[in-house]
Image: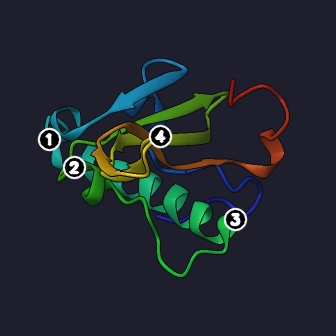
Amino acid sequence: FEASPSGPMDFPGVPLSSLFHDTISVWDAQSIARLSPDLGRHMTFVTDTMGKRSQIAQGLKAQITTLAKVRFSDHRMFMHVSGGKVNGFIKVGRKKLFIRNEYSQMHEIDPLCVLDFYVHESCQRMGIGH
């Protein structure tokens, strides 16, 4: 598969309507595991392409989001799809963090965090991230 040169979020040959039934679709380990092998390959391509775009947009050395990383974690990924195009995603999950209390003592917390996100450049500042 290749992303279309005419529109980076176009995925010719990928049955987006079979993968994404709503404008915003939620993906986690269980929903990914239920995909047929064929749809799993398509979803891997879409997710890994979006993750690569996130890496480039943020100037990171390594890609943070792949379908395999979502599948083998407790993370959740929300994909925004409309007009036959994938517009963006956000990935959330728990992350161990250390904070200081008012007495300067360190405490470990496990909050729900935004782990990665990407909105295609052609869709930015249009309200998709709200």
Give the side of residue 126 with respect to residue 108, left or right: right
Q: Secondary structure at mark 1?
A: helix
Check whether the beta carbons of the residues at disc 2 and disc 3 lie within 8 A of each other: no
Secondary structure type for disc 2? helix
Q: How is the image coloured?
A: rainbow
Q: At x 59% / y 60%, what residue is drawn? A: 54
Q: Are marks 2 and 1 in contact (CB under 8 Å)?
A: yes
Residue lying at 71% horizontally and 48% vertically, measured from the top left: 120
Mark 1, other Cα within 10 Å: few <14 / some 14–19 / many ≥20: few
Q: Amino acid at mark 1?
A: Ala
Relative to 73, does residue 53 appear above or below in the rendering?
Answer: below
Q: Quick check: 74 above or below 83?
A: below
Q: Secondary structure at mark 4?
A: loop
Of discs 4 and 1, which sits in the foreground? Answer: 4
Q: Amino acid at mark 2?
A: Arg
Q: Earlier in the sequence, mark 2 or mark 1?
A: 1
Q: Position of residue 82 (x, y in %)?
A: 63, 27
Task: Name the residue beneath numbered marker 2.
Answer: 71
Looking at the rendered structure, the kind of residue marked 4 is: Glu
Q: Which mark sits nearer the N-terminus, 4 or 1?
A: 1
Residue 77 versus residue 73 in the image, above or below: above
Would you call the spot at circle 2 few (<14 residues within 10 Å), some (14-19), or many (20 or more)?
A: some
Q: Which mark is residue 102?
A: 4
Q: Secondary structure at mark 3?
A: helix
Badge 4 vs badge 2, beta-carbon distance below 8 Å: no
